[in-house]
Image: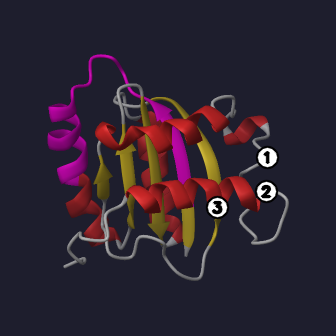
Amino acid sequence: MIQLIYLSDRPKTTSDEMIVDSIVLPAMRFNERADITGCLWFGRRHFLQVLEGPEEAVRSLYGRIEKDERHCNVRLLVLGEITERSFSRFTLKCIRDHEMEEIERVIAQFGGCQSANDGNPLVNHTRPGSAMADPFQTILVAVRRLASWRARPRV
């Protein structure tokens, strides 16, 4: 099982309604069938998503996201094996821009990240206690803090 975190730019023409109707709702159904869990945050300018699940399914989904016109400048931040999920209760927990301050702070920290093929130092680096574990944990802590504990469990 792996966890993948990416950051992408949101096209100016993509409305919140379009995100919910054409990304979030279909993704919830797809993720349940593919055994993928995670969280999607979107603000006025960015998407930040955590995907967790079987390696083949997560990598395949990420490949589709990289080609999706609703995402621009997709940057892989973290990719690594995990033993348990951080968002096991959610096929796709959606966090809206009104909760943006903390995520924007994290995005600002990673604003200069390049794609995985350009030597991003965070990719494949999730071992606790390692030098790069702090950025990984910062992202997860920020996203978890915003993911409401009141949400319903996965069905």
Please rate how many residues cluster around mark 3, counting C-alpha atoms within 10 Å: few if below 14, some from 14 to 19, many from 20. Answer: few
Q: Position of residue 118 (x, y in %)?
A: 76, 34
What residue is pinned by disc 3?
137
Is 75 positioned to the left or the right of 102 in the image?
Answer: right
Quadrant of image for the N terminus:
bottom right
Query: Could you say which is closer to the camera, residue 130 or residue 138?
Result: 138
Tell which circle, 3 or 1, labels the residue nearer the N-terminal end.
1
Asked whether residue 83 is drawn in magenta, I would say: no
- The quadrant holding residue 78 is bottom right
Toward the right, the furthest residue is 131
Circles 2 and 1 in contact, beta carbons < 8 Å: yes
Q: Which residues are magenta?
A: 4-26
Report the Cα–Cα distance between label 2 and label 1.
8 Å
Disc 1 element: loop
Residue at the spot of label 1:
121
- Look at 41% across and 31% down and name the residue there: 71
Residue 138 is tagged as: none
What crowding class fits label 1: few (fewer than 14 Cα within 10 Å), some (14-19), or many (20 or more)? some
Q: Nearer the viewer, residue 143 or 122?
A: 143
Query: Residue 144: horizontal and vertical position, in percent?
Result: 45, 62
Task: State the image quarter where residue 106 is shown.
Answer: top right
